[in-house]
Amino acid sequence: MTPLILLDSQEHSLRVEKIRSALATTGAKAILITDNANIFYITGRVFAGQIYIPAEGPVIFFVRRPVGLSGDGVVYIRKPEQIAETIGLNIPETIALELDITAYSTVQRMAAIFPGSQIVNGSTALRIARSVKTPAEINLMKISGGKQERVYRSIPKLYRTGMTDLELQVEIEKASRLEGCLGQFRISGDSMELYMANILVGDNADNPTPYDFAMGGAGLDPSLPVGCNGTVIRPGYSVMVDANGNYTGYMTDMTRTFAATAIDSLAMKAHQVSIDICHAIAEAGTPGTPAKELYHLAETMAKDAGLEHYFMGHAQKAGFVGHGVGIEINEMPVLAPRSKDTLQIGNAIAVEPKFVIPGVGAVGIENTYIVTQSGMERITCAPEEIISLEK
């Protein structure tokens, strides 16, 4: 038999208690979890089934697949209706579900299983619990950051004159997988899709997408309208690389800008402003700082530099300058103008002040930071300047 929980007991208990603390704000007496990202957060693995966490009492793991998992609280079931049978007389009067991501038919089925229970939304409580990383989670993110950095440092060696964006992307993806990248790109929130990397060359960066991305890209097919589109890397074009950083189940998010030859002075200026914004946010991002203040800091610096027309996109602009990251992209907190989030010690935040310069392409950087008592610690440490591909 294989233990279901892969976390050590102290780490598992800490995460369960964080969920219970956040759940108390919903008024629910229990939460039933089905989402893979949340199951992974609680156990260190993904399985088909549900996790039942009451406000008080033992956690129950309802498993359908795979076979052979064992441990305290593990109950194998064939169908969700057996959950209520197992709980018996302890069915809660109010139960939280992940309503932001749960199919309507599943919600209806759960309502029938717990006919006397009021169903409330537990999605935000789970996002709040996961937004503050434990030391163990931070360690996994630092491992991902180190591996991602090694891949980025190798990119000039992967480039060949005359390459298209797709050809370079394939080489970067190969290097990433050989370094140990899992390839999976979990994204939280509204419908948003992305492949292993987003490589943008020249004016393709100004092609709008359906998604709230700072950078666009027409993509290779309308079924995935984002990213590389076959553009040849030519003199004067920027090459922005935003590649998958998932090496441990916990992702880092890093963007760097490359160029085969020198690019014009406006793009160089915008790139330096991006670096300056990241540094300023890292210094100002202390615990208790409203996330929206950091967005306004970035916006003000872009305006003061006369670059507001290019900031966070040109033809189409993104509505944020940073976002939480961890098991998924777009976790809490979000650095946006109307964000209600406040920074806490242990938040992991990707800061990405980017610019699109017509005729050149996208410039700027993205770093992942951990919020500490004195500011934000960078864990994606590849060089920040525009990197020459001609090496």
Image (spheres, rainbow, N blue to C red):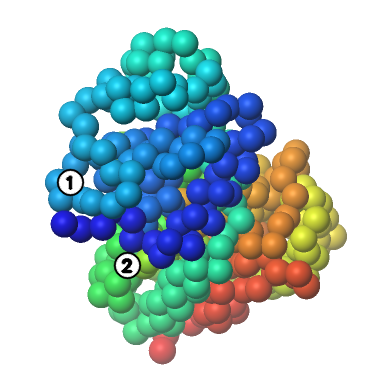
Q: Where is residue 3? Give x, y as percent.
A: 26, 57
Instruction: Tell which of 101 and 358 is nearer to you.
Output: 101
User: In the image, is 21 to the left or to the right of 57?
Assistant: right
Instruction: Tell which of 184 and 22 is nearer to you.
Output: 22
SS of the residue at dot 2? loop
Instruction: Tell which of 268 and 387 is nearer to you.
Output: 387
To which quarter of the image does residue 349 belong? bottom right
> Which residue is identified by label 1?
66
> Which residue is identified by label 2?
181
To which quarter of the image does residue 21 belong? top right
SS of the residue at dot 1? loop
Q: Report if the CB atoms under discs 2 and 1 are less than 8 Å apart.
A: no
Residue 253 to residue 84: above or below: below
User: In the image, is 224 to the left or to the right of 24?
Assistant: left
On the rendered image, what quadrant is the N terminus found in? bottom left
Observer able to see residue 325: no
User: In the image, is 163 to the left or to the right of 376?
Assistant: left
Mark 2: amino acid: Cys
Q: Where is residue 316? Give x, y as percent.
A: 59, 41
Q: Nearer the viewer, mark 2 or mark 1?
A: 1
On the rendered image, what quadrant is the C terminus found in? bottom left
Instruction: Tell which of 185 and 160 is nearer to you.
Output: 185
Residue 382 to residue 117: above or below: below
**Crowdedness of circle 1 by 10 Å Cα count: few (<14), some, many (20+)?**
few
Residue occupying image coordinates x 26% and y 24%: 82
User: In the image, is 47 to the left or to the right of 38?
Assistant: left
Return the disc, 2 or 1, that comes first in the chain's sequence: 1
Residue 111 to residue 120: above or below: above
Residue occupying image coordinates x 37% and y 27%: 87
The residue most toward the front is: 89
